Amino acid sequence: MALTGVLGVAAAAMAEPPKHKASHASAAEVQQVIPPKTVYWLSAATQNGFSMGGKPPSSGDMMKMAMGGGMGGVQKQLTLDLGSSLPPAGPPQASHAIPPVMNMGKALALRSPKPVAPSQPQSHEREPEHRDFERPKGRILLFWGCGETAHAKQPVVFDFSKLAAGQPPPNMFAGETVRVANPPSAGSWPTYGFWPNDDRGSRQSVPADSSLLGPHKVTGNYTPDIAFTLDQDWMGALNMVQTKLPSGALQLEWNGLPGATGHFAQLMGASRNADGGSDIVFWSSSETQTFISGLTEFIAPTEAARLVDHRYLMPPSQTKCVVPKEVMAATQGGMISLVTHGPEQNVVYPPRPQDPHTPWVQEWAVKARFVSRTGGMAGMNMPTADRSGKADQARCAPRPSGASMLGSALGGSLGGALGGMLSKPAKPDGCPN
């Protein structure tokens, strides 16, 4: 508790107000709230290019971007999650009736996960030992903060060999915890429905001209009727321009978006070190040390305001940030992403009673949350064409040689895509050889 708060409590205690006044004040301030038995979340993201936050790109997406074809323009993404503690009347069924302006039919089917068969007992036989294990050679170089020159005492270096030996440095995940709310899931609610799924309507992308504005209604056999109106639509597209400065630093500029609550940029790259291993380079726009956090996820406006105040997020008015020259010198290519956090719309039924003595028994609650993201290869702008119709320099630029190292070091599907797709140099049609 802050010093002023402690002093305030002490002063109140010494004053010793009459007991009947204290009880009257406490009764006026406290209202019993009964949480809803059904909750519904809409997560709406606007995606321009590739971003390290949100849905990862497919191999086809990576190939198009590597060949200068972008990611198919701006994409609207939508995720629906329905959770309920009410028992279903038979097999769980639910549907979301949507406004005509969504251009996706009359309704979206919310499917429930199929029951999972119990797993077979695991064998207790010991697996053969791998005596030829070689500890990885490499490091993680951690940078943070906007500016042409990296802040003092950067980078913070973490050795792979120590991590593999079970010796994570105590300050690896230094910084404040980001409070990210999780949507309903099969593990958090007795009955759960979601979209997109295996329904026919889920197989098509959200149309570019789709709008969320207007009346919505969710019905089903394990949920009360949930009727609400959205007055917040998908956020606009986030456009980022990268400019290499004479110092070697990389300047990022982007357009401001209505409803923005904060911005966050990050870069992930790699290079070979003198020991033959890989140096993985992480940089973020946070003015406080942060490594892997929830700063790219959906963040509520109140939490975004707190993170802006603590300088983890850039303020909504900021539209420029410079990646330090030391970061760019330490990596041979990489991926950069930018996230603009947006507003939320929350609806609770029934509304809160004005009489504080009346308990607020909530039947259902709806949360609609919004974000806009963009990104791509570090130092390479999204492909465009000038007025003469000729391909621009960004489109014809050779792909960074460090991308394959980044992919192999990161592993997983994204690492495989980076390492496999970007290992062989190529230029799009229309570019000089």
Image (cartoon, grey):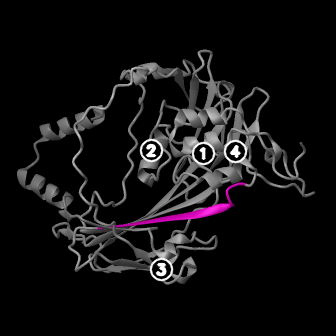
Give the quarter of the image for residue 417.
Answer: top right
Q: Assign a secondary structure to mark 2.
A: loop
**Alpha-carbon span between mark 1 and mark 3:** 36 Å
Residues rendered magenta in the picture: 70-83
Give the quarter of the image for residue 187.
Answer: bottom left
**Alpha-carbon span between mark 3 and mark 2:** 30 Å
In the drawing, what numbered circle is on residue 253?
Answer: 4
Specify which label sits upstream in the sequence, 1 or 3: 3
Q: Residue furthest right?
A: 388
**Alpha-carbon span between mark 1 and mark 4:** 27 Å
Which residue appears at 14% of the width and 59% of the height? 27
**Alpha-carbon span between mark 4 and mark 3:** 36 Å
Question: Which sits in the foreground, 232 or 399?
Answer: 399
Side (left or right) of 281 relative to 385:
left
Q: Position of residue 364 (x, y in %)?
A: 29, 71
Side (left or right) of 93 relative to 333:
left
Q: What residue is shown with label 2? A: 294
Q: What residue is shown with label 1? A: 417
Q: Position of residue 165 (x, y in %)?
A: 38, 21
Q: What residue is shown with label 3? A: 98
Q: Position of residue 207 (x, y in %)?
A: 61, 72
Q: Nearer the observer, disc 1 or disc 3?
A: 1
Specify which label sits upstream in the sequence, 3 or 2: 3
Question: Which sits in the foreground, 240 or 48?
Answer: 48
Residue 29 lies, with reference to residue 328, above or below; the image says below
Please state which amino acid type lies under the numbered disc 4: Glu
Give the quarter of the image for residue 227.
Answer: bottom left
Question: Which sits in the foreground, 359 or 340?
Answer: 340
Residue 129 lies, with reference to residue 4, above or below; the image says above
Please state which amino acid type lies under the numbered disc 3: Ile
